[in-house]
Structures are given as C-alpha cells and as structure tokens.
Image: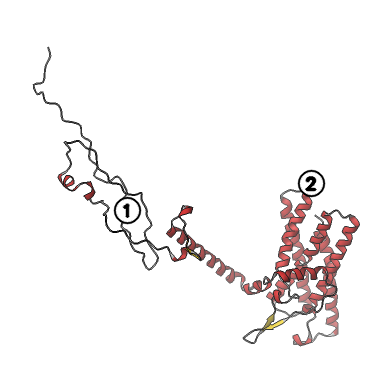
Amino acid sequence: MAYYNTNSRSPPPLQHPVPTHPAYIPEPPSTPMSPQGYQRYTSSPPTQSYVPNVGPQSHIAPSYAAAGVGSGPYHHPVGPASPPRQPHPSAMGPGGPIDFSSWGLDNTTAAFGMQLGHSAVAAGQEYVQKNLGGFIPISMLKHHFNVSNSYVSKKLRLLLFPWRHKPWSRRVIRLENGQSEWAPPREDINSPDLYIPLMAFVTYILLAALQSGLNARFHPEILGVTASKALAVVLVDFLFVKAGCYLLNIPGGLSSQVLDVLAYDGYKFVGVIVTLIAGLLALGRTLWFLVFMYTFLATAFFLLRSLRSMVLPDASATAAAVNPSQRSRRITFLFLVAVSQFVYMGLLVRV
C-alpha cells in the first residue's frame, strides 16, 4: 500500500549562511606622519565590492538588506584621496628619495634599518676609541695613512734606490694653536706611513701562495702559515728595536714610536717582494741571489738613515745632550738593526 503525503507543497529551497564579515582585509585609515617619523605602512590588496549571491527568498537581516553589505562596520569609506606619504628623511638619497620597493622592502622599514646601521657603526667607533684610543690614538693612525699616489710612487723609488737621497730629516709643521707636529706622509717623503707596509704585507702573502702553486706545493693552509711567519718576523723586529730604545734611554712618545717602528719594520716587505718576483721570472740562482743582496743593502741603508733621527736626535730637539759613550752605543745599535734585516728577509723569501 502506498502512502501519499497530503501536503503537496514542495520543500523550501536550501539556503547558504550569509557571512557577517567582509571577504577582504580592510585598509586602515591613513594617518599623517608624526614628528618622530612614525607612519603606518600596512598594505592590503585593492578593495573589491562583494555581494553574496543569494536567491530571491533570502533571509538576510533587515538591517543588512536595507543598507547593503557595504554599509557594515568594516566598510571602507569612499572619500577624497589621502595625501601622499612622504619618505623618511633617512631614506633620502642625493638625487631624491630612494625607492626600496624594487628590493622587496618597505621604505619605512628600510629607513629604520639604515638608522639602526648608523647607530651600530657609531657604537663601534666609540668602543674602539674608548679601548684603543689610550694606547694608540685614532688620530695617529689617520696620520700614518694620510698618503697620496705621488707619495707612494716616490716612497717606493726611495726604498729601492736610497743611495743619493737628501735630506733625511723629517719636516715639522706649526699648528694654529702654536704647537708643532710631524708633517703627514703626503707632505713629507721622509715621514713613515703604514699604507705601504700593509699593502706590501698582503702582496707578499699572495706572491708566496702563487710561487707555491707554481711549484705544485699549494694548499689552503699556506696562506695562514705565510701570514703567521710574516707577523712573527715583524713582531721580533719590533721587540728588538723597542728593547734597544728602552735600554739606551732613547726619548720619544710611546704611541708615536710604536707606529713609526711598525712602519719601518714593514718596509722590508718591498725588497722581499722584488726578490720573490725575481724567483718567479726564473732568472737563475746567481741573479736571484744578487737581487736579494741588493734589496737587503737598500733596506739596511734606508733604515740606517731613517732611524738615525729617532736614535740620534739633534741636540736642539732634546733637553739632555748625548755624551760620546751613549752616541757610540746608539750607533752600534743602529748597525745591528740594519744587519738583522739580512736574517729577517732571508726567512721571508724562503716560501
């Protein structure tokens, strides 16, 4: 037996729930930049109107049906365009504001990173000045790196051909406050610098590695071994000179003498480099030895004449005069410093 429903009406259609929140993240209202440089930098995709697709028999609340979806509390008001945002002052370049959007960065975020980097650099400089400034003033380091292209070329020529150079005395300049100091290297060829010794030190390590590679003896550790050997030679030479100055009671400021002695110790690398180049050119054992002896004699003569102003200063520059016995001991000390370069340079050319 079949049972039929007496109610012949069709069931009501299925209806989907109506969302009560927008389908996009609304753009917050733009705020002007504060005096401290803060501004909102959130961004969201462009807004699109959303109208739910509901049937004719929709059960939308009257408030929504009357006002529409766009009138909800999350509606983005359509009004006059907000004024363009100004870039942060630290993100300005010499030709105008820098656009970091091509790098995937927001301008405000990039400006904050630049400001943080400047603060870190300033803190590092303050730390170096606080911890190293008492031993070696930063101004003295700047003085020894104050060089020019003409000075470097003339100094290299002097290191290799010092035989006829005159005079050897260093220049003194007067400051506006009435004090006097040594002229910087760019103004005085007799002034010691740290630029040439540092560049010669690095070049020596590279040439030693190149020569080892040409002899099929290269391995990565040779760079560290060569640098350690060079630093050990410079340290031994430095301690020998400083110990002699202390025992002979040679006057002079500690910081200035430290940098001057390091500069004079580093000039030997120029002669070592010339000897290594002679070895790379395969000039023969005899010519190589002649080049080594010439560079040794040139370095020794240069140190004799340059260190003389430090070991045997003029009588007008010192308060106490140097008696004959002290003068004799200091001349012997200068001779030992010059002769010891043969040992140091002989160790450095063996790579």
**Crowd band around label 2 with a 10 angstrom C-alpha radius: few (<14), some (14–19), many (20+):** few
Give the residue pinned by disc 1: 27
- Viewer-nearest residue: 292 or 8: 8
Q: Which residue is drawn at the image coordinates 17% and 44% (left, top)?
A: 65
Split into 4 quadrants, where in the image is the N terminus? top left
Q: CA distance from mark 2 to mark 1?
A: 67 Å
- Residue 206 at x, y percent in the picture: 74, 56
Amino acid residing under circle 1: Glu
Kindly indicate whether the residue at mark 1 contacts the one at mark 2 (C-beta within 8 angstroms).
no
The earlier-in-sequence mark between 2 and 1 is 1
Q: Residue furthest left?
A: 6
Give the residue pinned by disc 2: 216
Q: Is residue 336 left or right of residue 203?
A: right
Q: Is residue 186 visible?
A: yes
Disc 1 is placed on an element classified as loop
Does 84 appear above or below 142?
above
- Residue 207 at x, y percent in the picture: 76, 56
**Crowd band around label 1 with a 10 angstrom C-alpha radius: few (<14), some (14–19), many (20+):** some
